[in-house]
Amino acid sequence: MKSNRRPDRDARPAGDLGGRRILLGVTGGIAAYKAVEVARLFMQAGAKVQVVMTAAATNFVAPLTFETVTGRSVYVEMFPERGKESPWHTELSSWAEVVVVAPATADHIGRIACGLGDDLLTTTLLAYERRKVVCPSMNPRMWANPAVQENLNTLRKRGYRIIPPEIGDMARPGEEQGMGRLAEPETIYGEVHHLLSAPQDLRGVKVLVTGGRTEESWDPVRVLTNRASGRMGFALAEEARERGADVSLISGPSEVIPPSGVRLTRITTARQMAEAVKREFGYCNILLMSAAVSDYTFDHTAKNKIKKGDPDPEINLIPTEDILKGISQNKGNRVIVGFALETENVLDNALRKIARRSILTSSLPTIHLQKAAVFR
Ligand SMILES: Cc1cc2nc3c(=O)[nH]c(=O)nc-3n(C[C@H](O)[C@H](O)[C@H](O)COP(=O)(O)O)c2cc1C
């Protein structure tokens, strides 16, 4: 899987998290030392940073290091010794505007996916209802373990924001390479900054997004498809979610990790895409059709693999349903945004597409304005 990390999120504007309350959970992974830099970046931007460590994490970095960087006591124990000052999990969860777990071990991810509350950090997360960001970090073989991936999917479905690990050297340079390295502190900072600064102007709005490509089967092994990556639809869904919308994402095949906190429907063919869009269209206020849906499909799919020596392999293409055209008849007061990919006469072709689909034909500037209003 490729990371859909966006470099433009790596900006580090000083002082613009002024007073924002960030709870940084640090768990027992080798990358715990990088969490010190994450805390430092938040502090540099003016945030208040409260660190909660697991007992295992204290084997990797001393709490004193975080206390020095953040100017606050670090909490580890759910049941501190009598006389020792430590807030309850409920106080910590009421205080924080966002909880960021970096690094998040496979063990911690498993425990939060199971809803366990066996230490201060997991119990705080159980009691926490707002923005939750998890930054996994582990050996590539642990990362590839189906149990870890299933736990992460559970978290995604529950609205956790997962900042995927990166590909590169593990702790000891040159020893082992692969996916599992904690995202860079600047990336984590950028994502959290974006999360905290997004206006909530789409709260209460239902947004339906389509993304990815479709695949039409010629025979059981060959498909007609295109080169769409899925990044556009995923980025739109992510942006809408961050601005408070209730987001449904219908996606064709894509190698990119889909955003968390959205309802995801996976489809493969143009026909399945049409059916899924028609099913959900009635419930949305805004439809963003960025999927690259095949314009053609095969008139039938061969039951068995078509052989190389076949003297007359049959390829009969028939047009697929024009989804946008069909649903725009019942547009009502929804905003519908279509996307066109062209290799020539880009603007003319896109204008013709709008006219053909009769979407706001008489008010073309409106679509731009609405798009601008919604997504700028
Ligand atoms: C040297 C060493 C490095 C470790 N690094 C990682 C790691 O990077 N990621 C991980 O998921 N577990 C790692 N572990 C295993 C965790 O420390 C272990 O699962 C622990 O129980 C995690 O506890 P916690 O989730 O409560 O912090 C490491 C263990 C050792 C001994």
Image: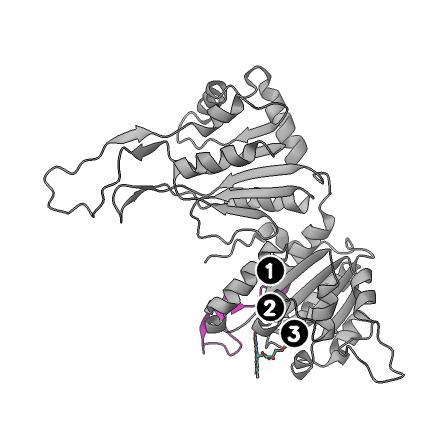
Q: Position of residue 68 (x, y in %)?
A: 79, 75
Question: Quadrant of residue 102 in the image?
Answer: bottom right
- Mark 3 CB within 8 Å of ligand 1: yes
Mark 1 or mark 2, earlier in chain: 2
Residue type at numbered disc 3: Thr
Q: Residue at x 30, y 29 (%)?
A: 318
Residue at 53%, 77% in the rendered image: 171
Question: Which residue is pictured at 38% across the width and 35% down the height?
Answer: 294
Q: Is-magenta flag for residue 180?
A: yes
Q: Quick check: can you spot residue 373?
A: yes
User: Alpha carbon of mark 3 to alpha carbon of mark 2: how far?
Assistant: 10 Å
- Are dots 1 and 3 in contact, CB under 8 Å? no
Whether 183 is drawn above or below 78: the answer is above
Mark 2 lies within 8 Å of ligand 1 (Cβ measured):
yes
Instruction: Classify 287 as above or below 140.
Output: above
Front residue of 151/235: it is: 151
Mark 1 touching mark 2, by CB under 8 A?
Answer: yes
Disc number placed over residue 155 in the picture, else none: 1
Point out the stretch of residues depicted in magenta. Answer: 163-187
Near mark 2 (Cα within 10 A), the count class, few <14, some 14-19 or many ≥20, is many
Q: Residue furthest top?
A: 362
348 up-or-down from 156: above or below: above
Indicate which disc residue 27 carries: 3
Q: Position of residue 348 (x, y in %)?
A: 46, 21
Question: Where does the image place residue 26, in percent across and percent down from the top left?
Answer: 68, 72
Q: Which residue is mark 2?
A: 109
The earlier-in-sequence mark between 1 and 3 is 3
Q: Secondary structure at mark 1?
A: helix
Separation (CA) of disc 1 from disc 3: 17 Å
